[in-house]
Image (spheres, rainbow, N blue to C red):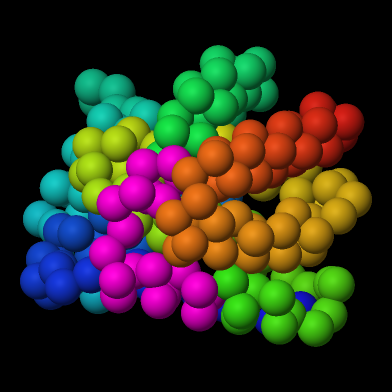
Amino acid sequence: MTSPEVSPVTDAAPMSLADQAYERLRDRLVMLDIRPGEPINDNQLAAEIGVGRTPVREALKRLETDHLVVSYPRRGTFATAIDVTELGAISDIREQLMPFAARRAAVHAGGAMRDALRAKADEVRSLESPRGDRTAMMRTDMALHRLIYKAADNPHLEDVLIRYDNLATRIWCLVIDRLPDLAHHIVEHADLLDAVADGDTDRAERLTREHIAGFAREIRGVL
């Protein structure tokens, strides 16, 4: 299964070096490429990303606010540890805000975004193989959610949901190889994307709740 990357429709200006460093480091922390508790070497990261130390340090400050890294005086900066008992609290927030975001997106998405949502739904349905790189599938899952958050047209709501998605995904990545049907979880986004694109608020909200509940059952089954 080839898991597509999803780029939200946006006319945003090119990212600064600090923003680029932030997104690169955030992805590595969320997907556990940088392991929980691992020390952060800003010199090494700057060289790997291809930017200076200043953008990396700015990125690390933002990542500390996101609870993805933690800094200790005279000790340095580390990837935060993962406490699986926090998943319940994180899920409480996502279960309230994600259906609201889907409903809002169904109302507020512009024409170009609705076209992008339909195109992405078709792309997801066209995935032929039920198997594939599970890390890539998890990235696709996050990207599809972010497309809906972008469509909701509320930057503050989008920011909050992305932050909690990131924290939840770190926990999921601990058990990703034990999830029984991750591919189905990805493909079922197609109907949700269509509901948002069609402006069907009730269906978009209902499908989001069902999607969250189904995945939560699978996660609880392996934790």
Q: How many marks?
A: 0
Residue 216 visible in the shown view: yes
Q: Which residues are magenta?
A: 102-120
Is 218 a magenta residue? no
Relative height, residue 155 to residue 188 (above, below): above
x then y, percent, for residue 158: 32, 43
Residue at 36% across, 42% down: 104
Q: Is residue 78 above or below residue 42?
A: above
**Occupied quadrant, residue 87:** top right
The residue sitting at 78% across, 73% down in the picture is 132
Where residue 210 appears, as percent x and y from the top left, is 70, 38
Task: Identify which residue is drawn at 16% across, 73% down.
Answer: 11
> Which quadrant: the N terminus?
bottom right
Q: Residue at x 55, y 19 (%)?
A: 92
Residue 48, quarter of picture: bottom left
The x, y position of residue 101, in whole percent, is 41, 40
Q: Quadrant of residue 124?
A: bottom right
Q: Main secondary structure of the magenta part?
A: helix
Q: Position of residue 97 (x, y in %)?
A: 44, 30
> In the rendered view, would you say 104 is above or below 189?
above
For the question of whether residue 25 can be seen, the reply is no
Which quadrant would the C terminus be assigned to in this image?
top right
